[in-house]
C-alpha cells in the first residue's frame, strides 16, 4: 500500500510547521518589541523612584534608616544608580561609592544642557527630563533621568541600557533553543499520538480493500467511541448488506441467464426427453412383461425358478424407479424448475464430509482413497447441487476403478476459481466417446453399466447442474486412469 501521502506524516508535518511558525513569530515579536517593552518598564521604574524619593524629601525622612532600606531596594531591584545633590552641589545621598561618576554627568546636564545632543528624549517635564545618552568616557548607553526635587535638591537616575539589550539578546537566544527543541519534541509526540488515529483508519482501509475483492469476512473490531469507530460500525453493516445483495444479484443473474436459454431449448428438450424415456424404458418393461407372463403361465413351477423370476422383475423395477428419479431431477434442471440458491460455503469441508461418509464403502471394495491437505476455500454456488455433482463423480469413480484401485480427490486454487477433481485408476475412456459421455443415456460400456445398475443419466445431471451454475466442467484421460473435474467461483 502506497504510504507516500500518509495522514500520520501529514499530521506531523503540519503541526511541526505550525510549532516552528509559532516559535519564529514569538522570536520576531521579541526581537522587535521586547527592548521597547523593557525600556518602557525602565521608564516606569524611574518615574516610580522619582515620586518615592521626592515624597521622602518633602517629608524629611530621606536620612532615616527606613528610607535607606527602601532606597537600596529601589536601586537593586531596578538596576538604577542614584545621586542627590543639594543646592551647593554637595552630595546628599548616592547609591555608589564613587559619587563623582554620577555627579559629573548631573552637573553637565545642569550647566551644559544646551550643548548636549541627546540620542533620544523619553520624557520631559518642568521638574525632570529623561533621555537615552551615550557616556563619553565609557561609550556605554544609559537611560538618564535628571532634574530638581520639590525641596530644591538635584537628582540623577542612571540605568545602563546595555543590560536591557543583553537581556533581550539572551531571551531571544533562549527562545530559539527552546523553540527548536519544542518543535522536534512536538513532532515526535505528534507522530506517536497520530498513530492512535491513523491505525484505525489503516484498518478500515484494509477492510475496504478486502471488500473491493468481495471478501466480506473482515470486520472492524475497534472499541473506541470516536467518529472512526462509528464509521467502522457502518462499514461492518455495509459489508453485511453487500454480501446479502451480491448473493441475491448472483442468484438473479444466474436465473436471468437460464431464462434466456430456457426459451430456445424448451421444445427441443421436451421432445428429446420423451424419446429417451420411451427408448430406455422399453428394455426393462419388456423384461418385466416377459418374466411376469412366464410366472403366469407357470413355465417353471419350481420355487427357485419363481423366486428368480420375481427377483428379475423387482430388479428391473428398481432400475426403472432409480432412472425415473434421475430423469425427473435432470428434467427439473434442464427446464429451470429447480431454483439455484447462490450462497457462500467452504467447499473443502463439503468434500471432506462426503469422503468421510464414503470411507466404509471404499474399504469394502478395497479402494485406496487419497486427498491432499487443503485449506478452507470459500466459493459461491448452490451447496446442495455441488454435493450432488461431486457425488456423481465419486460414484462414477467407484464403479470404474481398476488396476491399483486408487481414487484421488484434489482441490486446486486458481486466480478466480477452485477446481475440484476426482481421479480413478483404470481404463481410459475411448477418445471417440469423450464428446458423448455428457449426453443422456449414453453408455461407453453398456454391459458394465448394466452390471452396476447405471442408467447413463448421472453425467447428464452433472452437465445440467454446472450449466445452471454457469461454471466449467470436464474430463481428462491419463495412461493409468480418468479424471473428472468441475470449477466453482471463489468467494
Image (cartoon, helix red, strand yellow):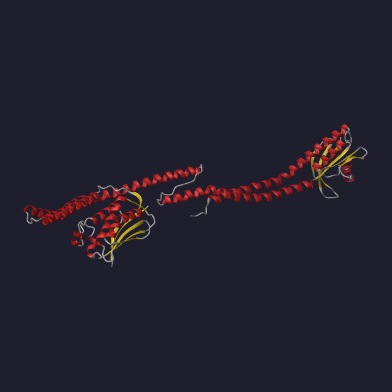
For the residue pair 307 and 447, the one nearer the viewer reads as 307
- Is residue 478 in view from this perspective? no
Q: Is residue 429 above or below residue 161?
A: below
Residue at left 29%, top 60%?
363
- Is residue 158 in view from this perspective? yes
Q: Residue furthest bottom?
A: 479
For the residue pair 384 and 270, the one nearer the viewer reads as 384
Residue 304 location, x and y as percent?
12, 56
Residue at left 68%, top 49%?
178
**Residue 129 falls left or right of residue 319:** right
Residue 205 location, x and y as percent?
47, 50
For the residue pair 185 and 363, the one nearer the viewer reads as 363
Q: Residue furthest right?
A: 88
Q: Is residue 43 above or below residue 319?
A: above
- Image-quadrant location for residue 33: top right
Residue 270 location, x and y as percent?
19, 50
Amino acid at each position: 500500500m502506497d504510504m507516500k501521502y500518509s495522514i500520520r506524516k501529514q499530521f506531523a508535518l503540519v503541526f511541526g510547521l505550525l510549532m516552528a511558525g509559532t516559535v519564529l513569530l514569538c522570536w520576531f515579536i521579541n526581537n522587535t518589541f521586547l527592548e521597547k517593552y523593557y525600556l518602557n518598564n525602565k521608564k516606569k521604574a524611574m518615574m516610580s523612584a522619582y515620586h518615592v524619593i521626592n515624597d521622602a524629601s518633602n517629608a524629611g525622612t530621606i536620612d532615616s534608616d527606613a528610607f535607606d532600606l527602601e532606597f537600596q531596594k529601589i536601586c537593586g531591584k531596578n538596576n538604577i544608580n542614584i545621586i542627590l545633590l543639594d543646592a551647593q552641589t554637595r552630595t546628599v545621598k548616592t547609591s555608589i561609592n564613587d559619587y563623582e561618576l554620577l555627579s559629573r554627568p548631573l552637573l553637565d546636564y545642569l550647566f551644559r544642557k544646551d550643548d548636549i545632543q541627546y540620542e533620544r528624549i523619553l520624557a520631559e517635564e518642568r521638574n525632570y527630563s529623561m533621555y537615552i545618552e551615550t557616556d563619553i568616557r565609557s561609550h556605554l548607553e544609559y537611560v538618564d533621568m535628571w532634574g530638581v526635587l520639590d525641596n530644591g535638591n538635584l537628582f540623577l537616575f542612571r540605568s545602563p541600557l546595555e543590560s536591557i539589550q543583553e537581556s533581550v539578546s539572551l531571551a531571544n537566544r533562549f527562545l530559539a533553543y527552546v523553540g527548536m527543541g519544542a518543535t522536534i519534541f512536538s513532532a515526535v509526540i505528534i507522530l506517536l499520538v497520530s498513530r492512535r488515529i491513523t491505525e484505525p483508519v489503516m484498518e478500515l482501509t484494509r477492510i475496504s480493500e478486502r471488500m473491493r475483492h468481495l471478501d466480506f469476512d473482515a470486520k472492524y473490531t475497534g472499541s473506541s467511541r470516536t467518529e472512526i469507530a462509528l464509521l467502522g460500525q457502518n462499514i461492518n453493516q455495509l459489508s453485511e448488506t453487500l454480501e446479502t445483495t451480491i448473493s441475491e444479484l448472483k442468484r438473479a443473474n444466474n436465473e436471468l441467464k437460464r431464462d434466456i436459454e430456457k426459451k430456445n431449448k424448451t421444445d427441443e428438450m421436451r421432445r428429446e426427453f420423451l424419446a429417451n424415456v420411451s427408448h430406455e424404458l422399453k428394455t426393462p418393461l419388456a423384461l418385466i412383461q416377459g418374466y411376469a407372463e412366464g410366472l403366469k403361465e407357470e413355465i417353471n413351477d419350481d420355487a427357485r425358478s419363481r423366486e428368480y423370476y420375481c427377483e428379475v422383475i423387482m430388479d428391473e423395477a428398481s432400475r426403472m424407479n432409480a432412472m425415473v428419479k434421475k430423469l425427473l431431477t435432470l428434467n427439473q434442471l434442464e427446464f429451470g424448475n429447480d431454483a439455484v440458491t447462490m450462497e457462500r460455503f467452504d467447499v473443502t469441508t463439503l468434500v471432506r464430509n462426503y469422503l468421510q461418509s464414503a470411507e466404509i464403502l471404499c474399504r469394502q471394495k478395497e479402494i485406496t482413497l487419497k486427498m491432499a491437505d487443503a485449506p478452507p476455500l470459500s466459493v459461491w454456488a448452490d451447496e446442495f447441487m455441488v454435493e450432488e455433482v461431486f457425488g456423481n463423480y465419486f460414484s462414477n469413480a467407484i464403479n470404474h476403478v481398476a488396476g491399483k484401485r486408487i481414487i484421488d480427490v484434489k482441490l486446486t486454487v486458481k486466480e478466480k476459481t477452485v477446481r475440484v477433481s476426482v481421479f480413478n485408476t483404470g481404463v481410459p475412456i475411448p477418445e471417440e466417446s469423450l464428446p458423448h459421455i455428457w449426453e443422456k443415456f449414453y453408455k461407453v460400456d453398456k454391459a458394465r453399466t448394466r452390471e452396476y445398475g447405471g442408467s447413463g443419466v448421472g453425467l447428464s445431471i452433472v452437465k445440467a447442474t454446472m450449466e445452471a451454475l454457469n461454471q466449467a466442467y470436464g474430463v481428462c484421460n491419463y495412461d493409468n486412469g480418468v479424471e473428472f473435474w468441475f470449477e466453482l467461483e471463489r468467494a
